[in-house]
Each structure stands twice: as C-alpha cells, then as structure tokens.
Amino acid sequence: MRWSVMVAALAVLACGCASSRSAPSADAEIRAGVHAATREYWQEALFRFQRAQQLEPENFKGLNNIAVSLEALGRYEDALGMYKKALEKSPSNTAVKRNYARFAEFYTSLARGVKPKETGHAKP
C-alpha cells in the first residue's frame, strides 16, 4: 500500500508536463521517472528525477519526486531533506505539503521506534 501512495504522489506532480523532441527537458525526465516509479524501478526513477533537477534546479516537482524516490529506497534522512527543499520552493503547493506531512508523520514514528501506520492514498 505504501508504494501506491508514493506512485500516486508522483503522478500528481507529473501532470501537465509538456514534451519536446529536441534535447531532453525536465518535464520529459519527470515523465520517464514517473514511468519507472510505477514499475517500482526506484533507482531509475531517482536517476531521472535528478536529471530533471539538473535541467531545472528551481523545479519543485523534481525535488518532491526525488524525495519520494529516496523514501522508497529507504534513504529516509535524505528524503526528509528533499521534502523540505521542495516545500521551500513551493510552500503553497497542496501536493508537496501533503507529501511532506505524510512523510514527517512516518519519519517521526520511525525515529520513536513505533511501527508507522499506512497513510492511505495521496489525493490529487
């Protein structure tokens, strides 16, 4: 169930991406990352999202999706830092706020040694 939450979070932030037939764009890399994530190829997804971030360093979608990938890979401290960066870039974005809040609850429970509960599906 946790994976479906992460994939849903990625899909929300991938919507509305334009494509380009020339050099790879950040939006194209994000779409490729979301595709990899839906197959649970999280290392590939992380790679794609990092490439998107290199192409557009100010793009909060890339930061959020990097965080989701790091979370899926079990790199929780790195994920927390990326969620915070995404929130700094876009503090009013509902999907970013929701992802950060969901992860913060999970991370706090994990740090306390309590088995985190599943949070359900992310909402668009």
Image (cartoon, grey):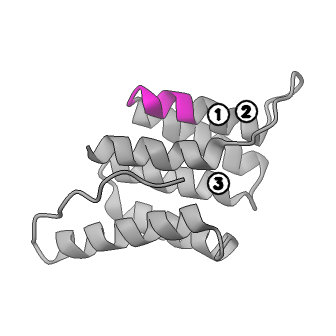
Q: CA distance from mark 1 to mark 3?
A: 11 Å
- Which kind of residue does numbered mark 3 sit on? Lys
- Against 61, residue 37 (above or below) is above
Residue 73 circle label = none
x 72%, y 49%: residue: 54
The residue to which callout 3 is attached is: 61
Q: CA distance from mark 1 to mark 2?
A: 5 Å
Mark 3 or mark 2: whose residue is earlier in sequence? 2
Whether residue 33 appears in magenta in the rendering, the answer is: no
Residue 31, horizontal then vertical, whole percent = 64, 33
Mark 1 or mark 3: whose residue is earlier in sequence? 1
The residue to which callout 2 is attached is: 28
Q: Residues within 10 Å of mark 1 (few under 14, many from 20)?
A: many
Q: Nearer the viewer, residue 123 or 80?
A: 123
Q: Residue 102 sits in which quadrant?
A: bottom left
- Which kind of residue does numbered mark 2 sit on? Ala
- Against 54, residue 28 (above or below) is above
Question: In the image, which residues are magenta?
Answer: 34-40
Residue 108, horizontal then vertical, whole percent = 25, 76
Residue 4, horizontal then vertical, whole percent = 35, 41
Farthest residue toward the right? 22
Residue 62, horizontal then vertical, whole percent = 63, 51
- Which kind of residue does numbered mark 1 sit on? Arg
> Which type of secondary structure does the marked residue at label 2 adopt?
helix
Farthest residue toward the left? 114
Q: Residues within 10 Å of mark 2 (few under 14, many from 20)?
A: many
> Which type of secondary structure does the marked residue at label 1 adopt?
helix
x 38%, y 31%: residue: 40
Q: Are marks 1 and 2 in contact (CB under 8 Å)?
A: yes
Q: Main secondary structure of the magenta part?
A: helix
Residue 31 circle label = 1
Q: CA distance from mark 3 to mark 2?
A: 12 Å
